Image (cartoon, rainbow, N blue to C red):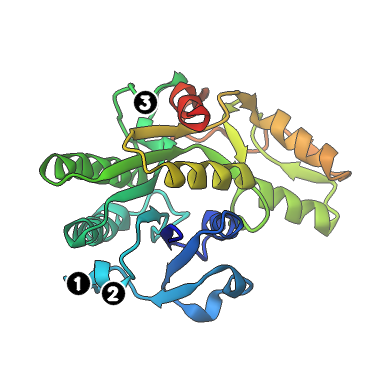
Amino acid sequence: MRKRILLTGANGFVGRYVTKRLKKEGIEVFALVRNKNKLHDLNSYVDKFFEIDIDNISDNIFDELGKPDVMIHLAWGGLPNYQSLHHYEEELPQQYSFLKAMVLGGLKSMVISGTCFEYGMQDGCLSEDNITNPQNPYGFAKDTLHRQLIFLNKEIQFNLAWCRLFYIWGEGQSEQSLYMQLRAAAERGDVEFNMSLGEQLRDFLPVEEVADILVNIAMKNMSVSTINIASGKPISVKDIVGEWIGSNNWTIKQNLGHYPYSPFEPMEFWGDTKNLKKIIES
């Protein structure tokens, strides 16, 4: 029997790439979406759709969603506004109730997207062993959900893989993202792209590679608690922007220093990938 994987957030930026990657593996793909009318080209990649909002579920939600072997959980509302109180006032309790109901119903394995914002204002190479200290509502809500699931896992056995995503980029990303703002400016014919001095060090991964990693982890049915989904290679913002400009043959120039640095992020951070390499190579 083919492995049956349920994907939430299938129509999101990362979810669309994960959906297509799952289909390549011969997986029976179930997708939980809020609105089937926004699926675009995903119909041929999904075996069955469920149009359900996680804030309104029954006690039999696991059965209603086809009793999947694994769930890749990417759905999260209120983004990309990381500062909104919505993340812990509304999203967090809804998320936990949904995930707990799935576990109580019989789900044995879940892969969940976390965020590097859980680490907060820490500089340097960030390991999964670092104590989390989130500084925005989104990071706080994600970190709290992770802790809730760890406690739940002590009461009910299930495989938990908490994947802390670092900086993802690619086609289909939010228009507010750095890559898509740059693309829009280049396609408009702008002479300059306004940005900060760009000396911040970040950890960027293309979305295709992130999708490959998430599917790989889901296929292994592993309980590893926390995994950094990162490149492990710090690069300055001005250098990554320069690479994007060069690879696309855009003529736009960087207008460095136009904006101040964000007060909500440290100047230098990237992910330690020792855990990730062990999992991928296993």
Picture coordinates of residue 70 (x, y %)? Answer: 36, 54
Query: What residue is at 46 percent from the left and 30 percent from the top?
Result: 279
Q: What element carries label 1?
A: loop
Asked whether residue 272 is in view, the answer is: no
Q: Which mark is nearer the camera, 3 or 2? A: 2
Mark 1 neighbour class, 10 Å CA radius: few under 14, some 14 to 19, many 20 or more:
few
Q: Badges 3 and 1: C-beta atoms under 8 Å apart?
A: no
Residue beneath disc 1: 60
**On the image, which quarter does residue 32 sit in?**
bottom left
Q: What element carries label 2?
A: helix
Amino acid on which disc 1 is placed: Asn
Q: Measure how far apart labels 2 and 1 are at the Cα level.
A: 6 Å
Depth check: give the residue in front, 268 or 212. 212
Quadrant into which the N terminus falls = bottom left
- Specify whether 219 is left or right of 192: left
Q: In this view, does 151 lie above or below 51?
A: above
Q: What element carries label 3?
A: loop
Q: Badges 2 and 1: C-beta atoms under 8 Å apart?
A: yes
Residue beneath disc 2: 64
Q: Earlier in the sequence, mark 3 or mark 2?
A: 2
**On the image, which quarter does residue 152 sit in?**
top left
Q: Measure how far apart labels 3 and 2 are at the Cα level.
A: 35 Å
Amino acid on which disc 2 is placed: Glu
Query: What residue is at 53 percent from the left and 69 percent from the top?
Result: 46
Q: Measure how far apart labels 3 and 1 are at the Cα level.
A: 34 Å
Residue 128, which numbered label?
3
Query: What residue is at 60 percent from the left and 59 percent from the top?
Result: 20
Mark 3 neighbour class, 10 Å CA radius: few under 14, some 14 to 19, many 20 or more:
some
Amino acid on which disc 3 is placed: Glu
Depth check: give the residue in front, 189 or 141. 141
In the displayed orientation, state which residue is furthest to the left: 155
